[in-house]
Image (cartoon, rainbow, N blue to C red):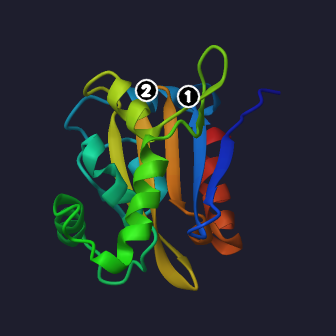
Amino acid sequence: MPLAQWYETTVFDRERRLAARFVVVPRRSLREPEALDFPPNAQHPLLERLGPDVIDLGGPPAPSYLPAALMVTFEPAEGLSSASLDDRIGAYPTYYPEDRWELRRFAEEVVFSRVIPFEGSPLGADSLATILTEAPVGIGLGAYIGFVAAGERRVLLFFTVPAGIIIVGAAETMAPGVGELLLRVLQGLVE
């Protein structure tokens, strides 16, 4: 019986009372690992498995814009569209008003700190920015915003790199209802 595995970690800021949760699915655990090798400018083959409420960001944002992408996961999803996401992420850091500075500082720290369990030899921790920038250019890179319902609609980020899939969001977003949905998505990818 082949075993599948994914890694989960939650990063919590005690002072700001904010938390982000990461789920990493290594390539070796995917049912169809070759799906991560899709060519540039092609629709990702895993996109249909993530469901109808997913927006293709056209590749990962530049590292300097990753905190803005993470900040979106802390907001309700109502009214978000591909265009409004581009506006929010593209206007970073000016889009987010002063009352969101604590969230901004947290997002910046999370994106650039080595906190994500990522397979290497041996297993280590890396930053989201490093994982996305050190992946080979083009092949297999993808970035998606997924909307999930758990009370109110919330946002999750999905990143694909040749080595696997990274799912990230506000820890509160990945509450029990969303956790069940996420489990179904992950089981569909690894079974």
Q: x, y (%) of residue 98?
A: 30, 76
Q: Which three-letter amino acid code belongs to the residue tagged 2?
A: Pro
Q: Look at the picture and state if 166 lies above or below 132.
A: below
- Does residue 142 appear left or right of residue 118 in this picture? left
Q: Which residue is mark 1?
A: 27
Q: Which three-letter amino acid code belongs to the residue tagged 1?
A: Arg
Question: Is residue 128 something one can see in this rendering?
Answer: yes
Q: Secondary structure at mark 1?
A: helix
The residue most toward the front is 15
Q: Look at the picture and state if 116 lies above or below 21.
A: above
Give the camera-side residue of 69 and 42.
69
Q: Secondary structure at mark 2?
A: loop
Q: x, y (%) of residue 103?
A: 43, 67
Which quarter shows the C terminus?
Answer: top right
Instruction: Classify mark 2: residues with Cα within 10 Å, few (<14), some (14-19) or many (20+).
Output: many
Give the camera-side residue of 144 and 63.
63
Asked if the residue under mark 2 is in contact with the one under mark 1, i.e. CB atoms within 8 Å, the reply is yes
Q: Quadrant of residue 120?
A: top right
The residue most toward the right is 1
Which quarter shows the N terminus?
Answer: top right
- The numbered mark at residue 70 is none
- The numbered mark at residue 162 is 2
